Image (cartoon, helix red, strand yellow):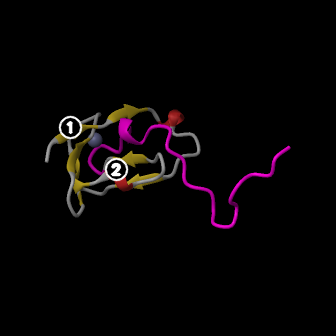
Amino acid sequence: MSEIMLTPISPRDIGDRPLFNTGLSAVGRGGEDYVCGHCGHVMMQDFGLSRLETDIVFVCGSCGGHNVSEELKGRVPPPPAGEGTPPSV
Ligand SMILES: [Zn+2]
């Protein structure tokens, strides 16, 4: 387990990404510790972000700052079931 510093962003960079407020500290079921890029607060302990399929914005419960994970950059959710292959044009 290691400590990973999240990338601080400003609120105008959130875009349409979903927000996740970690509260004072969110504890996962195994993984890394994620630290707020604004204030250094440990936002998530033992979290495995590699299982997430969407690029989300983490809101620090300590300073209210917004952070993103480089790990999740560019990830998009899979298409809803039933939308298999796009029709060819
Ligand atoms: Zn913070």
Name the quarter showing ligand 1.
top left
Q: Which-is-in-front pick, marks 1 and 2?
A: 2
Q: Quadrant of residue 35?
A: top left
Q: Mark 1 vs mark 2: which is more N-terminal? A: 1
Q: Is mark 1 within 8 Å of ligand 1?
A: yes
Amino acid bearing label 2: Ser
Q: Position of residue 34 (x, y in %)?
A: 24, 45
Quadrant (top left/top right/bottom left/bottom right) for the C terminus: top right
Q: Quadrant of residue 70?
A: top left
Q: Which residues are magenta?
A: 61-89
Question: Which residue shows up at 51% across the image and 52% down it?
Answer: 18
Amino acid bearing label 1: Gly
Question: Which residue shows up at 29% across the image and 34% down it?
Answer: 38
Task: Report the number of discs.
Answer: 2
Residue located farthest toward the right when viewing the structure as drawn:
89
Residue located farthest toward the bottom when viewing the structure as drawn:
82
* Secondary structure state at the residue bearing disc 1: loop
Label placed on residue 40: 1
Neighbours of disc 1 within 10 Å: few (<14), some (14-19), many (20+): some
Between residues 8 and 45, which one lies in front from this camera angle? 45
Neighbours of disc 2 within 10 Å: few (<14), some (14-19), many (20+): few
As displayed, is residue 7 above or below residue 82?
Answer: above
The residue that label 2 is drawn on is 50
Residue 16 magenta: no
Between residues 67 and 82, which one lies in front from this camera angle? 82
Q: Is residue 78 left or right of residue 20?
A: right
Q: For the stretch drawn in magenta, what is the main secondary structure?
A: loop
Can residue 89 be seen here? The reply is yes
Residue 80 magenta: yes
Q: Position of residue 30 (x, y in %)?
A: 20, 59
* Secondary structure state at the residue bearing disc 2: helix
